[in-house]
């Protein structure tokens, strides 16, 4: 039975507290070390990025919201706080913080803004995970990871980044070739686990080109522990040398590509076994948060799965007619992922929170959480506060009611921007018309897990195989080295005997029973996440890493120093899917109808753009602020 890592978590927390000792009274330091971190942001030593164990949507963030959403329960009354604001923003993710920034810029620096969030840290999905080990600091993004195609961001999003001093090119230059940022042709591992194949093994090579019948694909596929017949079929599928066992229905090929599940295509038409199709799952599970049973053939091909070769020119023409193009994706990773955006926005909005201004000094800037919510600042950021009701009052004001540490309170503002989840919108905005409530909550957010495991030495990982390992039959779909950077005074340790952050990502695997939509699967998977205690996740992590590193001298007891598991029960914004959604006319999609402003309330957040990316969050903020300043 693998040991639990809890004790080391505590040691990790202590080393962090000790790192801050120079600026604290020694007695205060030891007091903090004795009792762990304080829970109120104003207290000395409150620093959530170093917290380990279950993070993301951590315990205490959802009790109030679920009581409201599931049982319709909310406080009978709220005490009015003697605070008035020009704007209250609900949600401190990229969208909420961008909304505060845009509003200050458009309406005036003197405007009083309150930001509220139900977590113990700001950033929403764009939060920082920070570890300290033997004098070295390692940071990573706890959720939202990279600038994806930043060249294609809207002018407003680009301008925001420039104005706050986030130079994407500086971040790009600092990026070191690790994890997803490794060279495109860097070897990847395909982990074949003992539970499925009787023995642990990793087949390492250029798997992404192999799925398109390129490189040494035959050698790679022949090294997999599959029956010979399956290997032959797979080779014939990826290079197109074997015709379909059963032709696709005659007629509109594009319609078939959009309406047939990829797994049905691979099993019934290509002739692969269901077990073999699991090899295609890992990337699908972290992009669409389902298996190949719940995405279309077209979505599978767009995700990089095989199919183009066997579909031939006719298939390519059909795909191109719907705008499909082979384009590379440009990823830029900051050391702490998109927490770089949220930290820089907070530092801009509340300058006393941390020294410095540039992207170079941001990563090592220690944030002082006691500065977040001070009455003498025009912008205040209040954590651990779940908003339960937003009302347009008859006097033209908006009242925003929330529960902080069990206390129901209420503030007044001229405007409110709700930058939380669309699923919460109907519950917190009871004045919305019923049809709008239905539209707002149409899309179900997909659940995700992102774990960081600090191991004492990188060697086992570097010896095991690829920088990125696909794990088709395991709980975590992808296991990679964490991303690495050299920027300002920060440099990720890179040597084989240096500590390493291992990054595990997945959405809980739920098989489609044939009558479920992706949204049904997301709801089921979310409930699985709530029902799974940290210890069970920890055991899964230890077992999976022990199997993956089976051919090295990895010893979980000795080598794992700490685990931070970011549980995103409400993860990516819902993006419409071929199999489950009709094609909505422009302006008539549920997210567009659901985000219409109501009185002095506007709606932001990536959900309102149906776009699970940082730029979607910024664009939503810009739209909502435009609505407010023009109102
Ligand atoms: C694991 C993961 C990886 C991702 N990777 C990338 C990536 O690499 N690149 C990329 O561009 N995007 C990525 N994304 C998408 C990510 O969602 C966006 O980049 C962005 O962070 C979304 O910001 P947001 O402000 O819209 O929402 P969020 O970050 O979800 O922020 C909303 C905040 O509002 C809070 N809130 C909601 N309701 C209430 C309430 N009633 N009261 C108080 N607070 C409330 C929420 O708890 C949350 O803190 C990823 C997402 C996840 C989950």
Image (cartoon, rainbow, N blue to C red):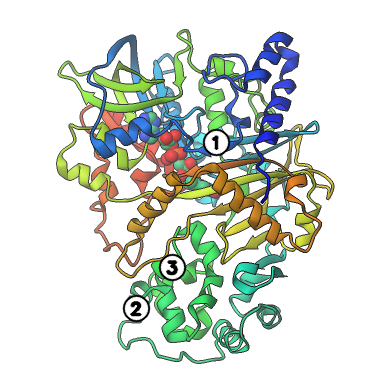
Gap between marks 2 and 3 measured at Cα: 12 Å
Give residue 475's quadrant in the image.
bottom right
Looking at the picture, how far across and down is residue 255, in whole percent? 32, 76
Q: Residue sitting at 65 percent across and 71 percent down?
A: 207
Residue under the point 63% across and 88% down: 228
- SS for callout 2: helix
- The quadrant of the rendered image in which ligand 1 is seen is top left
Which residue is label 3 attached to?
299
Say whether residue 419 is visible. no
Q: Disc 2 marks which residue?
A: 256
Q: Nearer the viewer, residue 395 or 273?
A: 273
Which element type, helix, strand or loop, lies under badge 1? loop
Please give the label number shown on residue 127.
1
572 with respect to 412 (left or right): right
The one of 621 and 470 positioned closer to us in this rendering? 470
- Disc 3 or disc 1, which is closer to the eye? 1
Q: Earlier in the sequence, mark 3 or mark 1?
A: 1
């Amino acid at each position: 039975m693998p040991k639990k890592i809890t004790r080391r978590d505590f040691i990790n927390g202590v080393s962090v507290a000790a790192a801050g000792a120079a600026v604290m009274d020694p007695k205060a330091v030891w007091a903090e070390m004795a009792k762990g971190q304080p829970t109120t942001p104003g207290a000395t030593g409150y620093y959530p990025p170093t917290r380990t164990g279950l993070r993301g949507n951590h315990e205490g963030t959802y009790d109030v919201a679920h009581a409201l959403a599931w049982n319709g329960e909310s406080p009978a009354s709220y005490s009015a706080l003697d605070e008035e604001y020009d704007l209250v923003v609900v949600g401190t993710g990229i969208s909420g913080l961008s909304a505060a920034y845009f509003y200050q810029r458009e309406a005036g620096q003197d405007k009083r803004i309150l930001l509220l969030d139900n977590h113990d840290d700001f950033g929403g999905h764009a939060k920082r995970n920070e570890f300290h080990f033997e004098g070295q600091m390692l940071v990573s993004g706890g959720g939202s990871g990279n600038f994806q195609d930043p060249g294609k961001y809207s002018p407003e999003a680009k301008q925001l980044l420039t104005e706050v001093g986030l130079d994407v090119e500086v971040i790009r230059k600092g990026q070191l070739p690790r994890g997803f940022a490794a060279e495109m042709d860097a070897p990847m591992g395909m982990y074949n686990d003992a539970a499925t194949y009787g023995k642990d093994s990793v087949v390492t090579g250029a798997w992404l080109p192999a799925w398109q019948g390129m490189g040494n694909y035959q050698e790679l596929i022949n090294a997999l522990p599959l029956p010979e017949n399956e290997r032959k079929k797979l080779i014939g599928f990826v290079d197109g040398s074997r015709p379909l066992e059963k032709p696709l229905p005659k007629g509109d090929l594009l319609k078939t590509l959009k309406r047939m599940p990829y797994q049905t295509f691979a099993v019934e038409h290509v002739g692969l076994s269901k077990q073999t199709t699991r090899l295609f799952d890992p990337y699908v599970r972290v992009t669409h948060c389902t298996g190949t049973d719940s995405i279309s053939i077209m979505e599978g091909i767009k995700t990089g799965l095989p199919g183009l070769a066997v579909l031939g020119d006719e298939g390519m023409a059909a795909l191109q007619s719907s705008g499909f193009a082979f384009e590379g994706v440009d990823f830029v990773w900051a050391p702490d992922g998109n927490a770089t955006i949220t930290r820089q926005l907070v530092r801009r909005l509340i300058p006393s929170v941390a020294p410095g201004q540039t992207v170079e000094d941001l990563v090592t800037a220690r944030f002082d959480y006691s500065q977040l919510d001070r009455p003498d600042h025009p912008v205040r950021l209040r954590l651990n506060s779940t908003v339960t009701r937003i009302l347009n009052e008859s006097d033209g004001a908006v009242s925003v009611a929330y529960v902080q540490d069990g206390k129901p309170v209420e503030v007044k503002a001229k405007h409110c921007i709700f930058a939380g989840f669309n699923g919460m919108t109907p519950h917190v905005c009871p004045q919305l018309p019923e049809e709008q409530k239905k539209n707002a909550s149409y899309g179900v957010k997909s659940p995700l897990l992102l774990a960081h495991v600090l191991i004492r030495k990188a060697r086992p990982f570097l010896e095991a195989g690829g920088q990125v390992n696909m794990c088709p039959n395991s709980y975590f779909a992808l296991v990679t080295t964490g991303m690495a950077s050299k920027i300002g005074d920060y440099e990720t340790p890179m040597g084989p005997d240096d500590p390493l952050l291992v990054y595990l990502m997945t959405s809980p695997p739920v098989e489609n029973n044939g009558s479920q939509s992706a949204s049904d699967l997301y709801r089921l998977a979310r409930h699985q996440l709530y029902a799974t205690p940290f210890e069970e996740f920890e055991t899964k992590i230890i077992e999976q890493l022990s199997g993956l590193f089976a051919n090295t001298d990895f010893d979980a007891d000795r080598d794992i120093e700490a685990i931070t598991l970011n549980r995103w029960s409400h993860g990516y914004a819902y993006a419409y899917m071929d199999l489950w959604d009709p094609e909505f006319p422009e302006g008539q999609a549920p997210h567009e109808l659901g985000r219409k402003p109501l009185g002095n309330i506007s709606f932001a957040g990536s959900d309102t753009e149906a776009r699970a990316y940082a730029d979607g969050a910024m664009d939503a903020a810009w739209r909502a602020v435009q609505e407010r300043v023009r109102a």
